[in-house]
């Protein structure tokens, strides 16, 4: 299998930071706030590889650092330290050494992002179709009929009623907004997709349909995905491999089935037990 | 001058700074060069940006033409011309396009083609075509730098979805030399194609917004459109599909002003008064 | 050719200028023209406003500008500003110390007792805003008598030459951050360089110093009312004459070349959570302008504080957004643009009509 992303030693600190930050925080000490300088160690020494077409789950409660990891990789923020290499068709890209223009180019063309809050991923002032058109226009598709056709296909694929493609997404239901967001993220057929708590807050039946949709897309387009969630059910259904995080550290990692069958860390055991 | 004002009003340092910005603007077609626009003794919005360019460029051997809305005799054109004549002793002024070396205009490019030895200065109220999708100048600069115009193009897309037409009437966003998109000033769409491959240097001056930009001679200028939804100029055909003519000179190709005459009848007349008069002179021999 | 209203412009402009001149001189039979000295002295606050918004300290020409514009503040400032455009910049003064101001007024809202004491000076703050009907028919004799009475009661020497600053004592107590001498930047000259965002603080201050009073007040007021949270305390407001120093052309020694009437305001705002600073202190906002313009100086100080916050943490409301504030407070820019809408827009309107008719036709065709 081909590697698509390699993350090494990714750390994020909010605050001034000091030499003792990493040593004085973590799951064993049950805190991510440095007692010496008051900084928050949101993420420490995260490393993993991701392969083409693979879904990797990152699971943890809020404050565990899972969203921070994705925000760094999608350039919503710059990490405190660490490296990540994106293996694109055209060559290797060291993510945190790229200039702002290169970073925006990756975001616009090669990465997709689906946020928990559709407001972040969609422009509510333009139509559902327009949202998808924007991403196509970034990629220099300049034929109106072709843009309409591609937008219609994508919305149909994500099970949005295509007769609503010219309506504003702010008038849509939460589940429908999430589908439009997924369609928009897929518009440029990115090889790598980030999903941050995409089903949180939706009705259970809607959740199930969206998770099915994500699986179908993965098998059709062979898109690699990083799925961030606090929900064991989401992990169980989507992720082949999973990282479990607490206080900014990975406390357990491996095949999802294995983790669910035979959790090693006390925290994971507790999680699995409570879900069963 | 008797009242202690320098030739062309501005002090020489100011004029030199404007010329420097101007050279940069010519070197990077379509790029908005910031400059420290001075206060002119007429209102911001009345053409102070174009005026500063004209004053920085004009010399005693120049012949100047000033147009507003196509007319040399409109209030604002007269006002600007009088001010320039007052502060630039020795220059000549004209209303005939062919005689002019320097032309300052608001809202129109002359009907007749410009020559290589002429410079056209256009007055600009809003220099940045992106302002309709992004209010922050800081962010707009990045978008221009990366030629990221997707948000502007989505506007066109949404227009066609809603109205089956691109509804931008004037200030039509135009891509210069394949990169920067400019606001070509409030000229009608009819004038936009004249920017393309022009023999004359075309300069844009925004006084209030403190920007200068240029479309150099023989430069690519493409109005924004989709491959299958072309850019269209104003339609002057009547209900039978026939092109309306100017009631004075009979021209069937010029940009027309529409108005209701004293009998309450709708009539059409050339917007470019100099062109219209020359057409009439020709007709009468 | 009844239509072409824009033609015959030359004659129309001359006529308009005459009509305005007639408006200015219509009292000619019964009164004499305003002299510039009267404007400076009796329309003191109007004059102050023009000095500051015109951005040129020339008391006599400011009076002239008021006279010829019939008291329109925007027009008068405009004329002064345009005059300034014709003048090259020849010299630069060193940084001035406002401790050296010869004060006519200084107050502090933060302490009752301030070193040097409070000095109320000329202010309408505590005046009852009742119309003084007796001034309706004030005779020159009455006018003189008032002045005579006031001068007679004046002791020879009431006011010291200068006062210490309230901020110095706050700073000495460690309640304010120390002045960072290293960070002192070369001042940004807004008359020679365009604003390219982000701009340094000196560019923001210079822009506001000649900003339009009403615009500054409106945006500062939005911050005070809840679209922002500066919550200022006026540490010191001082009005007086600041000596202007220039290097002597031959000896190079700093020499006083004159003085300018100025208003200066320093506000202290509550400490705001700041991750990077170890010791919490108050934060500062600074406002200063030519002339005696207290509301303007206070508004500017509040906006300075708001903008500093916006530059550091990102703007959360309009008053903290440098682009929003600095590009909209200049009276010359904004009044010019508002006025230009009175000019003909025939060509663009023709284009608008074309688009509207085309879309109307398309919609009608679609409905059939």
Image (spheres, grey):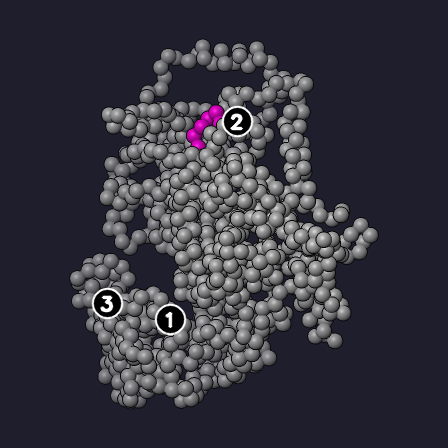
Structural distance between the alpha carbons of marks 2 and 3? 64 Å
Residue at position x 43%, y 62% from top? Answer: B144
Q: Is residue C100 left or right of residue B159?
A: left
- The crowd level at tag 1 (other Cα within 10 Å; few <14, some 14-19, many 20+) is some
> Is residue C22 among the parts visible in the rendering?
yes
Say which residue label 2 marks. Answer: C64
Specify the subunit that label 2 lies on. C
Residue nearer the viewer, B206 or C28: B206
Mark 3 vs mark 1: same chain? yes
Q: Are marks 3 and 1 in contact (CB under 8 Å)?
A: no
Graded by Cα atoms within 10 Å as few (under 14), some (14 to 19) or many (20 or more), the crowding at tag 3 reads: some
Task: Rate crowding at label 2 as few (under 14), some (14 to 19) or many (20 or more) other CA atoms within 10 Å.
Answer: many
Q: Residue B79 location, x and y as percent?
A: 59, 40
Secondary structure of the residue carrying tag 1 is helix
Q: Can residue A42 be seen by looking at this rendering? A: no
Q: How far across and down, in percent of the image, does residue C95 sit?
A: 30, 34
Q: Name the residue at 58% across, 38% down.
A: B82
Residue at position x 38%, y 84% from top?
Answer: A223
How far is disc 3 from disc 1 in space, using C-alphas? 22 Å
In this figure, which residue is indicated by the disc labeled 3? A81
Work out whether B133 lies above or below A225: above
The residue closer to the viewer here, A79 or C79, is C79
Which is more toward the observer, A145 or B270?
B270
* Chain letter belonging to callout 3: A
Which residue in the protein does label 1 denote?
A105
Of the residues tagged 3 and 1, which is closer to the observer? Answer: 1
Q: Check chain identity for marks 2 and 3: say if they share one.
A: no
In the image, farthest residue toward the right: B263
Question: Percent from the top left, x then y, of residue C204?
Answer: 39, 44
Q: Which residues are magenta?
A: C55-62
């Amino acid at each position: 299998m081909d590697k698509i992303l390699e993350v090494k030693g990714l750390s994020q600190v909010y605050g001034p930071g000091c030499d003792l930050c990493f040593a004085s925080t973590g799951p064993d000490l049950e805190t991510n706030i440095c007692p010496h300088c008051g900084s928050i160690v949101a993420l420490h020494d995260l490393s993993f590889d991701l392969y083409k077409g693979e879904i990797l789950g990152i699971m943890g409660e809020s404050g565990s650092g899972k969203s921070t990891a994705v925000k760094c990789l999608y350039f919503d923020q710059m990490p405190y330290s660490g490296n990540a290499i994106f293996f694109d068709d055209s060559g290797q890209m060291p993510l945190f050494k790229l200039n702002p223009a290169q970073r925006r180019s990756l975001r616009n063309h090669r990465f997709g992002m689906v946020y928990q809050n559709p407001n972040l991923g969609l422009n509510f002032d333009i139509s559902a179709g327009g949202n998808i058109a924007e991403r196509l226009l970034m990629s220099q598709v300049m034929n109106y009929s072709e843009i309409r056709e591609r937008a219609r296909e994508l919305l149909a694929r994500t099970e949005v009623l295509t007769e609503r493609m010219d309506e504003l997404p702010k008038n849509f239901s939460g589940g429908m907004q999430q589908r439009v967001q997924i369609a928009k993220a897929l518009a440029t057929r990115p090889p790598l997709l980030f999903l941050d708590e995409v089903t949180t807050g939706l009705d259970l039946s809607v959740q199930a349909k969206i998770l099915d949709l994500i699986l179908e897309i993965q098998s059709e387009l062979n898109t690699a995905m990083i799925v961030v969630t606090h929900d064991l059910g989401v992990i169980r259904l989507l992720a082949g491999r999973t990282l479990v995080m607490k206080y900014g550290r990975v406390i357990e990692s491996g095949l999802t089935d294995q983790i669910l069958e035979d959790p090693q860390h006390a925290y994971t055991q507790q999680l699995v037990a409570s879900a069963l | 001058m008797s009242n202690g004002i320098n030739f062309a009003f501005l002090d020489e340092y100011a004029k030199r700074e404007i010329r420097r910005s101007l050279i940069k603007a010519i070197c990077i077609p379509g790029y908005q060069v910031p400059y420290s626009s001075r206060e002119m003794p007429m209102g911001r919005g009345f053409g102070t940006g174009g005026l500063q360019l004209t004053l920085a460029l004009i010399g005693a051997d120049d012949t100047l033409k000033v147009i507003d809305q196509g007319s040399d005799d409109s209030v604002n054109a007269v006002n600007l011309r009088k001010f320039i004549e007052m502060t630039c002793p020795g220059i000549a002024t004209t209303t005939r396009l062919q005689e002019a070396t320097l032309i300052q205009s608001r809202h129109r490019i002359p009907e007749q083609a410009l020559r290589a030895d002429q410079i056209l200065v256009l007055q600009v109220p809003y220099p940045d075509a992106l302002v309709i999708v992004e209010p922050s100048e800081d962010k707009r600069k990045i978008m221009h730098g990366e030629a990221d115009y997707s948000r502007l193009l989505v506007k066109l897309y949404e227009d066609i979805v809603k109205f089956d037409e691109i509804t931008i009437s004037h200030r039509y966003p135009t891509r210069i030399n394949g990169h920067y998109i400019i606001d070509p000033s409030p000229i009608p769409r009819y004038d936009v194609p004249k920017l393309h491959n022009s023999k004359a240097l075309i300069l844009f001056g925004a006084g209030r917004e403190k920007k200068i930009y240029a479309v150099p001679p023989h430069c690519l200028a493409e109005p924004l459109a989709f491959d299958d939804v072309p850019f269209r100029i104003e339609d002057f055909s009547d209900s039978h599909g026939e092109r309306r003519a100017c009631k004075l000179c009979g021209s069937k190709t010029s940009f027309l002003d529409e108005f209701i005459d004293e009998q309450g009848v709708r009539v059409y007349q050339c917007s470019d008064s100099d062109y219209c008069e020359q057409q009439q002179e020709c007709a009468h021999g | 050719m009844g239509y072409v209203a824009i033609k015959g412009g030359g004659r129309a402009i001359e006529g308009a200028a005459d009509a305005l001149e007639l408006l200015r001189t219509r009292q000619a039979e019964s009164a004499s023209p305003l002299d510039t000295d009267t404007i400076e002295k009796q329309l003191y606050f109007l004059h102050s406003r023009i000095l500051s918004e015109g951005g040129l300290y020339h008391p006599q020409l400011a009076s002239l500008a008021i006279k010829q514009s019939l008291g329109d503040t925007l027009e008068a400032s405009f004329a002064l500003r345009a005059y300034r455009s014709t003048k090259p910049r020849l010299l630069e003064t060193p940084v001035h110390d406002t401790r050296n101001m010869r004060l006519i007024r200084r107050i502090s809202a933060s302490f009752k007792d301030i070193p040097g004491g409070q000095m109320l000076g000329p202010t309408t703050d505590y005046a009852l805003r009742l119309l003084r009907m007796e001034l309706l028919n004030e005779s020159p004799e009455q006018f003189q008598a008032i002045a005579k009475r006031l001068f007679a009661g004046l002791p020879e020497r009431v006011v010291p030459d200068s006062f210490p600053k309230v901020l110095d004592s706050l700073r000495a107590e460690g309640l304010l951050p120390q002045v960072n001498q290293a960070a002192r930047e070369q001042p940004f000259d807004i008359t020679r360089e365009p604003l390219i965002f982000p701009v340094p603080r000196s560019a923001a201050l210079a822009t506001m110093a000649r900003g339009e009073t009403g615009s500054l007040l409106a945006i500062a007021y939005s911050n005070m009312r809840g679209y922002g949270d500066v919550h200022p305390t006026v540490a010191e407001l001082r009005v007086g004459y600041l000596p202007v120093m220039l290097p002597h052309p031959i000896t190079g020694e700093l020499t006083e070349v004159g003085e300018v009437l100025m208003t200066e305001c320093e506000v202290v705002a509550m400490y705001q959570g700041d991750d990077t600073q170890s010791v919490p202190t108050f934060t500062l906002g600074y406002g200063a302008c030519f002339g005696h313009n207290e509301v303007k100086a206070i508004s500017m100080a509040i906006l300075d504080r708001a903008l500093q916050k916006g530059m550091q943490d990102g703007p959360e409301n309009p008053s903290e957004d440098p682009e929003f504030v600095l590009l909209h407070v200049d009276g010359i820019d904004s009044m010019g643009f508002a006025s230009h809408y009175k000019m003909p827009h025939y060509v663009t309107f023709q284009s608008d009509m074309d688009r509207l008719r085309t879309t109307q036709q398309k919609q009608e065709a679609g409905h059939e």
